[in-house]
Image (cartoon, rainbow, N blue to C red):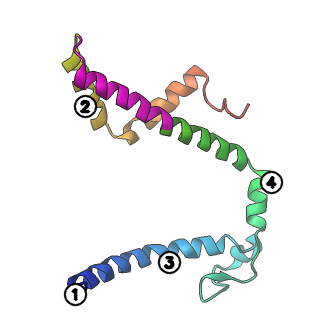
Amino acid sequence: MLNRSYYWLVTALAIPAFLWLVPTLWMVSLSFQPNEVLARTTSSTFLGLVPIPFTAENYAALFAFGQTPMWFVNSIVVAVGMTLGVPAVSTTAGYALARLDFPFKTPIAVLCLIGLMVPEQAVFIPLYTMFSDLGWRRTASR
């Protein structure tokens, strides 16, 4: 039998989860309304979550006229590449740094640790500039 503190913990965690979930559900439900209705009001829903009228034309237009399918394929390529590449490179580098003796082992390990300390957000713009200079920008879609 679970004690009372467990139920208080679940309740304390459920409240912020619910507060996060309601605006997300509302946003998703509004995406199923026609643009003409959304231009006038965002309150034409049943119980605040079921859109009236209900339509999927926004999603049809998103996939029919936009570049969303290409973006989706690009995202899949990057996600699969990173999912397979990062563990492969990390395990081989970790094995080499842990088990093998080679010159400059300590400075290379320190450089790896320093690289982990740099936030990803700090390198977005330099990476974009580098890829653009190399001509790698928008190449997957050509």
Give x and y (percent) for residue 74.
63, 40
Q: Which residue bears the numbered disc 3?
A: 22
Residue 64 - label: 4
- 63 left or right of 16 in image: right
Of the numbered discs 1 and 3, the one sitting upstream in the chain is 1
Report the Cα–Cα distance between label 4 and label 2. Answer: 45 Å
Give x and y (percent) for residue 50.
65, 83
- Which of 2 and 124 lies nearest the eye of the viewer? 2
Residue 4 - label: 1
Of the numbered discs 1 and 4, the one sitting upstream in the chain is 1
In the figure, residue 39 lies in which quadrant? bottom right
Residue drawn at the location 22% of the way across and 10% of the way down: 103
In the structure shown, which secondary structural element does the residue marked by tag 3 occupy?
A: helix
Report the Cα–Cα distance between label 2 and label 3. Answer: 40 Å
Amino acid type of the residue tagged 4 in the rendering: Ala
Whether tag 2 and tag 1 are in contact, CB under 8 A, the answer is no
Amino acid type of the residue tagged 1 in the rendering: Arg
Give x and y (percent) for residue 119.
33, 40
Report the Cα–Cα distance between label 2 and label 1. Answer: 44 Å
In the structure shown, which secondary structural element does the residue marked by tag 1 occupy?
A: helix
Amino acid type of the residue tagged 3 in the rendering: Val
Report the Cα–Cα distance between label 1 and label 3. Answer: 27 Å
Placement of 7 over or under 112, stated as above or below: below
Q: Which residue bears the numbered disc 2?
A: 113
Residue mark closest to the camera, 1 vs 4: 1
